[in-house]
Image: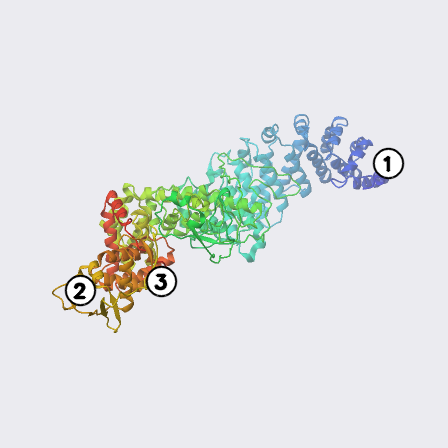
Amino acid sequence: MSDAKLEAAIAAVQKPQERGGLVRALIALRKEVEWPKNRNGIGKLRESGCLKLLTDILRSSGVGHCLNLALSILGNCLMDRACSREVVVQYNILTTIKQLLKKHPKEDSVNGRLFRIVANLCQHRDLWANIIIDRKPQIVNHIVRTLERTCDAVCEKMSDATISMALKALRELLNSQTVMRLVKDFGVLRVVGRLLIKCSLELDEKRGNERLLLDVLKVVQEYSRYKCPLSIPELRGTGRGDALARLGSAVEVAPRRVVKIVMNFLQLSQHQSELPVPEICGYLIRALKSYSVTASTFTEFDAHNEYLRCLCLLLDDPANRTNGRCGQSVPVLVKVLRDYEEPSNAVLDNCVLLVATLAKFRYDERLLWAQIRCGVVDVLVEKLRWLVGSSSELDLRHEIELPRDARKPRPASLHCYRESDDDSADEAEMSSCSDDDTFRWFEPLPDRKMSPCSSPDSLRTTSWSSPGTSTDDDDVDDSDEYSPVCSEAGGSPRPEASAEDDDLPLLEKFEATEAGDVPANASTSDRTLRKKLFVVIGSLLRSYAKLALPASDLVGEQLLLALLECARLDDYAAAVGLICSIFSHHGYLLPAMETKFAERAYRLTRWRHAPQRCRRCKRHLEVGQPIVNALTALAESGGGKGEIAHRLLTGADDRSRELVALAVPYVVGNASLLATLLLKCGGLDILTTLLRRDADVETSSRAVEALHTVAAHKLRIANPRSGPPPTRPPIIADAYAPPPETGVVFVLDDGARVVADRDFLASKSDFFRLLLTGDHFLESGAKEISLPQVAHKTLRCLLHLLINVRDTDTVEVHADLDTVLDVILLCDRFLLVGLCVALTTTVERFAMCPRTVPKIYGWSLESRTNFLRVEAIAYALVAEVDEEERRAMFDGLRALGRPDDLVEDVERLFVRHLTLGHADRRAWTSKHSKRVRLTLPPTSDNF
């Protein structure tokens, strides 16, 4: 706008001239004061004194262009507050409006422009609406009569623009001080209700008056915000029918406005039949069923989003959450939640709203069970995968994390593992060792790459972020937030905490980050939405956990593991608390024991590194220990003990009994109860039976881990490898120096000849004493003696060890395992008891490892000496090795073809310790951990 054109237009209007020239001047002036394009020109027009000239034109002109142009210009000027005050106070515009309405009661163009002036005047906070109603009620009466004539079929029809301006005027006249008079004295809602009925009927006839119906709904919505007790009776008693009943037909045009009207009127309604909630809910349900949110129909997401949020808004009030009102909303909400496949911000926002709405049904158990029957738990598992990823196996190996003040330089990108197999070492002793003493560094295993759930913004994020935000129209400021009687606020998310990001798999990778987090490339809003989603899912699951009857879906393995994975999030205590709340009901004990959850939760409680050195081990313990404690409390309660025992003794099927037996070691901590369940109730028989199964690798491996848990962590069976370090220098086992020719010569099967000292051998064992110096044997006087079934290398090793090793020594002996085992057999054959004990102790302490245990056990069985037989089984059960190594170890034991002996040895070991008291077991452990050891170093050539 140029100032020159505005000044020229003002000058033209102020100049005395004929009617035609005045019309042209008014047209030019109207162009220069358009709102809001040329709003600055309105102030200059007021300063020039043209407002008085325009009001004079209103009083002097008849119906025609001059009057209409003056009314249009004044309508624009009254958008400015200063102009409104001037024309009312100085030029008495209200009286002029009343006179014009009285003079031209049916003139459509005049009435429409006057209604606009009234609406624009009342939008300012100068209480002009109160003044109009108190001093000029004729204006309001005229507006109401105009709408009444519109509803009369025999009356000439007014233009839609005039009706819209009349409805807008009724909206702007409304405030907290005028609402009662407008409803009671002027009957505004009665006539608006009649107009609503007329427009909705025309809509049913497909006559295309959606815009007018929308204006009517705006008026009803504005009046519904005020708690006027007459509002509902006025709308129901219109004389043409119940206007509220027609809201069900109007929901197609403006679903959000209709739902807000209903929610506002719910505070005033006395009977459920007063509001058409079932009809509106039914329409929204049908609309949601007709829309799909798959990738091919994302263009329809806005419409789908509108209907979804309207339904959730409708269900926000407890009065609507009944079978009669909400109908089939539960299956539809679950279906919509299931259909979301990609976690974009818009989808996450909708998921938060959906789950929060489902959680509001927590006071009606029937509707909660309806949700569960619709498979909502499986859907929640899918959404939890968005938070933590999609892996399936728990991997607890991780790089050690030292406190900042205790960290030392170390090789980059190296993983650490415990060098010692004995997990019963004193923690204080471990903490006092240096890194080099306690750990051995190895090259890391290749890391799996992360597959984080994508978060594409393929859907346009809706601007309607909450049920109360308006997006229907651009010309109206919709601040009509409803306030239901019993509005239930959802839980707020935890404050966001800092966390490290990495590229490891997210699921069940507690070690991947210290505090856990969503993918690093997620935006701040995405992170907030994901945390909100976890909060509302937790609220819904807690509602299911409080049901009187247990819901088996809550202890499904996938859900429990997903919740366990969520403990990686910032507020891990929330996930842990949620899991513990589920296990507050006895009905969930046995179903949970029939999954792998107890086993995986128990693994988190085992320290992988020194307690003072690894922060992640500490986090694992903080996550796993409360969960294991909750399961243990259930299992060791009166009902829990009976249920477990009954299932083990009289289970419905073998598979159920097996699964419960596999979980007993992880959930039972009491020694007496553990002995009862394993021995008297047959739990040990089930586990050893599973140990035989070569075909079922998974079940057999789980049985091995269960037995390991009982042996190592519950019964504390000593590891045969525990013992003191060697105290003497190494001894080369094959460096035998024969004595002079005066000694005895042993002739072997292969013709080899070995010379030995006759007197020395006679002093070492009764066998040689009687053989070499006795009076009843021919060999006592012979210079050469035949020794059948003796190898040359074995005999030389035996003679060397007899010379160099005392029974009380602990020394290193360089020899291969097969030779030492053969020497042990010779010691037993030749009654060399002291050396036999020393060598068996040597093998037990230093030679046992996952690779050699099957060989040692098979040698013990084949030789029928039973040397190291129990020790080999004990090591296989209690050694702290990887699952793969333990599995391979037992595979090697089963491959010997002696399954009965293997099972028998395992059962005897457990029976011995389960039947011992605590003091007796401790004494037995102490006795077997202080025996004299003989060291044989595990090299590539030796064992």
Q: Residue at x 38, y 44 (%)?
A: 429
First in sequence: mark 1 vs mark 2: 1
Quarter of the image holding residue 897? Answer: bottom left
Tell me if 635 is positioned left or right of 521 in this view.
left
First in sequence: mark 1 vs mark 3: 1
Instruction: For marks 2 and 3, give the one nearer the viewer.
Output: 2
Residue 359, given in percent of the width and then of the height, sits at 45, 42
Residue wearing tag 1: 11
**Circle 2: element type:** helix
**Circle 3: element type:** loop
Identify which amino acid the numbered label 2 is placed on: Leu
Identify which amino acid the numbered label 1 is placed on: Ala
> In front: 530, or 569?
569
Identify which amino acid the numbered label 3 is placed on: Asn
Residue wearing tag 2: 772
Residue 456, given in percent of the width and then of the height, sits at 57, 53
Q: Residue at x 19, y 62 (%)?
A: 768
878 vs 484: above or below: below
**Circle 1: element type:** helix
Q: What distance separates the C-alpha of mark 2 from that of mark 3?
A: 34 Å
Residue at the bottom extreme of this rendering: 751
Q: Are marks 2 and 3 in contact (CB under 8 Å)?
A: no
Residue 719, given in percent of the width and then of the height, sits at 31, 51
> In front: 608, or 766?
766
Instruction: For marks 1 and 3, give the one nearer the viewer.
Output: 3
872 vs 50: above or below: below
808 vs 773: above or below: above
Quarter of the image holding residue 872? Answer: bottom left
Which numbered circle lies on residue 942?
3
Q: What distance separates the C-alpha of mark 1 from that of mark 2?
A: 148 Å
